[in-house]
Amino acid sequence: MNKYYLFFGNLANPLKIEIISALKEKDMSVLELTKKLNTEQSKLSHALTSLKHCSIVNDKKEGKKRIYSLNRETILPMLQIIDKHEHKFCGKCRALESRNK
Amino acid sequence: MNKYYLFFGNLANPLKIEIISALKEKDMSVLELTKKLNTEQSKLSHALTSLKHCSIVNDKKEGKKRIYSLNRETILPMLQIIDKHEHKFCGKCRALESRNK
DNA sequence: TATTCATATGAACCATATTTCATATATAAA
DNA sequence: TTTATATATGAAATATGGTTCATATGAATA
């Protein structure tokens, strides 16, 4: 239980959530992600490295590209839980919109 | 999907994880938590307010105490997923121990 | 209705994570 | 074997969130 926050830290970031959202559709190279998310390459590389460290994404080399894919086994059920949570508990309280303060 | 990171931000913090862990055992007042976690009162109040905003915990007034409880419906399955993830994907790579870098 | 107990709040300060930018590495193609 | 392409890395700058501390609020009791 003690180190969970390190895992969640990786999800507590809008860019990383965008990456996850994009990779839900299909596996992608860094370049594809830069285009899709209109984001700088090094920024993405940093984020992807971080996500990889927690096994939230996987990667494989393909020529000079590196293809990233989502760890669907962990992440999809987790997102389902959040969706359910949002619908059930965050109606008008808009908990997911409020700053964490 | 866009605001998920705000929810996760609340879990990306050692103190908040400790709070969750403590509330898993039983509902507690702020004072009980300060003793259990050996932590300052205002620190806990700030953290609890934040957790409440995302409906991760609930509260009820009881005399001059305020009793906090865990949203078990969302949080217990979520912790299960992480446990499974940890065992399956974070063996020797110790992803949950590495800094998110 | 003072006083004490329990908790919340605000703002300044501080720590940590993210962004940026310059550069390094690695692979393929010319 | 140089050049171009794709990605990674490091360090400084910046942003973001957490902690601290003093104080406010709110409820019970004397």
Image: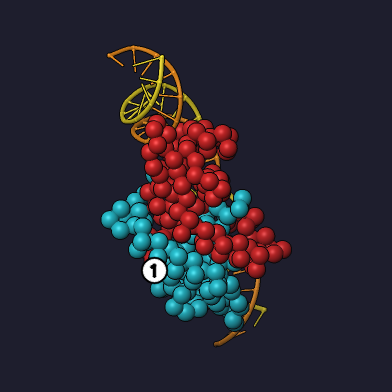
Chain colours: A cyan, B red, C orange, D yellow
- Say above or below: B16 vs A13: above
Name the chain letter of the residue that bears numbered label 1. Answer: A
Query: On the rendered structure, is A84 left or right of A45?
Result: left
Q: Secondary structure at mark 1?
A: loop
- Say above or below: A7 vs B35: below
* Relative image position of residue A68 (x, y in whole percent): 54, 74
* x 28%, y 56%: residue: A92
Q: Local crowd at mark 1 within 10 Å, few (<14), some, or many (≥20)?
A: few
* Relative image position of residue B52 (x, y in whole percent): 40, 47
* x 40%, y 36%: residue: B62
Q: Which quarter of the figure has residue B15?
A: top right
* x 49%, y 41%: residue: B28
Which quadrant is home to the N terminus of chain B?
bottom left
Q: Residue furthest right?
A: B92
Q: Mark 1 belongs to which amino acid?
A: Asn
* x 44%, y 78%: residue: A25
Which quadrant is home to the C terminus of chain B?
bottom right
* Relative image position of residue B82 (x, y in whole percent): 57, 62
Q: Where is mark 1, residue-wise?
A: A38
| Tally of numbered tags | 1
